[in-house]
């Protein structure tokens, strides 16, 4: 009897999308290496997932919350696919993007008029099939964080769009969102401690990573990817536009 149960459990464990709670899931979604070996070892599939929605939770801008993904973004933009920056708090720093291997002509900066437009733009960017990566920012203010409490349905639509497009979809949110449910398959918390970017993983296909992983080799140029302290409305971009959904 026990052997039969064990055989059934083993058979279930081999099914796609099923994993043991104490083990990292085998790759169901394609993954791209972040370039940080210690982090990649903690990610199911050995890298940042594509074809699914991920979340980066952080407080403050320019701590390295985008820079550590530079290698993955470069891979996602291969094959003439676009990288969409939707509602980014600052204009992406062009020299650092080029240094990281992200083609500037494939970067699309979208400046939506409001939160609803931002969600709509992210979903459409993914469903278009033209984007290899879609980065979406929710504001870090408390009022905006509270608004996220009713966004599960919107996040679910983003998750479904990412799966259909096989795109790398990353949503940047406040750490206050950690207490909220999410359809994202991966959720990480990024923070700086003693001048070093550290990554904690409260949600992944496997047990949470409680002990943070230090990301100490970003380099000066990579650190500048998300820290061009220029408001988006102040500097025009050759591939940026603003819109309102009617």
Image (tube, rainbow, N blue to C red):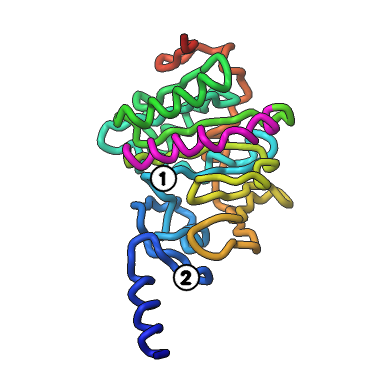
**Callout 2: SS:** loop
Q: Is residue 3 magenta?
A: no
Q: Closest to the observer: 98 or 69? A: 69
The residue that appears at 65% across and 41% down in the rendered structure is 177
The residue that appears at 49% across and 11% down in the rendered structure is 244
Residue 99 higher or lower than 228, as above or below: below
Residue 19 falls in image quadrant: bottom left
Q: Which mark is residue 176?
A: none
- Disc 1 crowd rating (10 Å Cα; few below 14, some 14-19, many 20+) is many
Among all residues in the image, which is located at the extreme left?
Answer: 79
The residue that appears at 52% across and 27% down in the rendered structure is 93
The answer for how far apart the CA atoms under marks 2 and 1 are is: 20 Å
Q: At which x and y percent is residue 238?
A: 41, 14
Q: Is residue 240 left or right of residue 176?
A: left
Name the quarter where the N terminus is drawn.
Answer: bottom left
- Disc 2 crowd rating (10 Å Cα; few below 14, some 14-19, many 20+) is few
**Callout 1: SS:** strand
Q: At which x and y percent is residue 89?
A: 60, 25
- Residue 37 in sight in this render: no
Among all residues in the image, which is located at the extreme front?
Answer: 1
Q: Is residue 209 left or right of residue 25?
A: right
Residue 179 higher or lower than 124, as above or below: below
Q: Closest to the observer: 198 or 128? A: 128
Q: Kindly report the secondary structure that dominates the magenta region of the rendered protein.
A: helix
Q: Which comes sooner in the sequence, label 2 or label 1?
A: 2
Q: At which x and y percent is residue 153?
A: 52, 35
**Residue range corresponding to the magenta coloring:** 144-164
Could you tell me if the residues under marks 2 and 1 are in contact, i.e. CB atoms within 8 Å?
Answer: no
Q: Which residue is mark 1?
A: 52
Q: Which residue is mark 2?
A: 20
- Residue 42 in sight in this render: yes
In this view, the mark in front (2 or 1): 2
């Amino acid at each position: 009897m026990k052997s039969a149960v064990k055989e059934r459990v083993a058979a279930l464990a081999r099914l796609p999308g099923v994993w043991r709670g104490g083990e990292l899931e085998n790759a169901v979604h394609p993954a791209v290496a972040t370039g940080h070996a210690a982090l990649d070892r903690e990610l199911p599939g050995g890298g940042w997932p594509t074809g699914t929605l991920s979340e980066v939770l952080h407080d403050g801008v320019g701590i390295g919350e985008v820079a550590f993904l530079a290698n993955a973004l470069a891979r996602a933009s291969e094959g003439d696919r676009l990288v969409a920056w939707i509602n980014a708090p600052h204009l992406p720093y062009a020299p650092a993007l080029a240094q990281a291997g992200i083609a500037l002509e494939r970067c699309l900066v979208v400046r939506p008029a409001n939160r609803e437009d931002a969600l709509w733009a992210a979903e459409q960017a993914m469903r278009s099939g033209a984007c290899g990566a879609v980065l979406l920012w929710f504001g870090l203010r408390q009022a905006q964080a509270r608004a996220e409490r009713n966004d599960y349905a919107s996040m679910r639509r983003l998750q479904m769009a990412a799966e259909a497009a096989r795109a790398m979809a990353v949503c940047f949110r406040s750490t206050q969102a950690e207490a909220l449910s999410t359809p994202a398959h991966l959720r990480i918390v990024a923070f700086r401690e003693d001048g070093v970017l550290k990554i904690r993983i409260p949600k992944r296909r496997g047990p949470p990573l409680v002990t943070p992983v230090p990301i100490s080799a970003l380099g000066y140029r990579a650190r500048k990817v998300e820290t061009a302290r220029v408001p988006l409305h102040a500097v025009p971009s050759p591939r940026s536009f603003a819109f309102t959904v009617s």
